[in-house]
Image: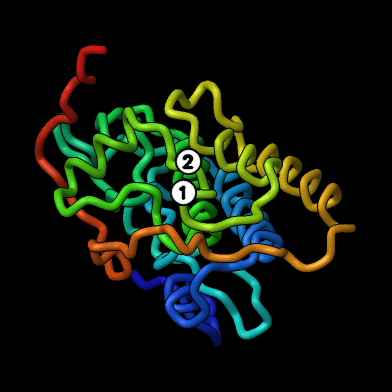
Amino acid sequence: YFCALEYVDGKSLMDMMKDKGQIPYMDALRLTREIASGLDYAYSQGIVHRDIKPDNILCTKEGVAKITDFGLVKSNQQSSITQTGTILGTPFYLAPEQAFADKAIDIRADIYSLGITLYHMIAGRPPFLFENPMRVITAHCYNPLPPLSDFVTGVPAPVEQVICRMTEKDREQRFSNPEEVIQSIQEVERMLSGMGPSPTAANPNAAAPEVDYEDAPTRMFQGQVPPPSPA
């Protein structure tokens, strides 16, 4: 067997962020909409990617986003490859239900990871950065996202609202499919189109990341996410 893939003359989204740093929110919204369009086609074919992250998004020289690396793909026609107690994915972008090794993973896990990717594009870093991968995974399960204003100033509230909806801990509260993500982003783009260039800037009070997240590999973990701490 062999697999023929499109040649993409460009670089990964992660490499693009290494070169440029934070991405203006209007550009980040456009890229997210294009990625969601790719996920929508996958969704129509019964496919869940399960490892959406900047390293797995290629950007052409024209700036068009393409999804790659379907190594963890889950199809409706096959049983899950996830075993009980096994967590598959990249901790910095992992959906809570993946962290709990839920066998009924659906497209909403990809929507969560795409929302974290959008957060990363605008903030210049993922929301949760800890040395211990299980601590990162646990944060995705229980901790609210740090406000974007912790890392960048000038992001309009509607942009942050889209991210919050995409990254709800309870998947029932997220967008139910990529088309809903696309429509919501288009509404925000129309709302903000008259504002001119994205007037954002790095928050000068933000601490520099102490964890290397730029080359985070896809990993398999054996274990379980601990229960939430008592209130």
Task: Give the residue displayed 81% in from the left and 44% down from the top.
Answer: 187
Where, by quadrant of the figure, is residue 70 drawn?
bottom left
Quarter containing the N terminus: bottom left
Whole-percent x and y of residue 109? Answer: 44, 38
Where, by quadrant of the figure, is residue 135 drawn?
top left
Whole-percent x and y of residue 85? Answer: 14, 32
Task: Give the residue displayed 54% in from the left and 54% down from the top.
Answer: 118
SS state under label 2? helix
Residue that label 1 marks = 116
Point out the residue furthest to the front here.
Answer: 205
Viewer-nearest of discs 1 and 2: 1
Determine whether label 1 and label 2 are within 8 Å by CB: yes
Snapshot colouring: rainbow
Badge 1 amino acid: Ile
Point out the residue furthest to the top here.
Answer: 231
- In this rendering, the answer to whether 191 lies above or below 83 is below
Number of numbered discs overlaid on the protein picture = 2
Whole-percent x and y of residue 166? Answer: 55, 38
Whole-percent x and y of residue 51? Answer: 38, 53
- Which sits in the foreground, 102 or 28? 28
- Which sits in the foreground, 45 or 104? 104
Badge 2 amino acid: Tyr
SS state under label 1? helix
Q: Residues within 10 Å of mark 1 (few under 14, many from 20)?
A: many
Residue that label 2 marks = 112
Q: Is residue 199 left or right of residue 102?
A: right
Task: Give the residue displayed 54% in from the left and 58% down from the top.
Answer: 152
Quarter containing the C terminus: top left
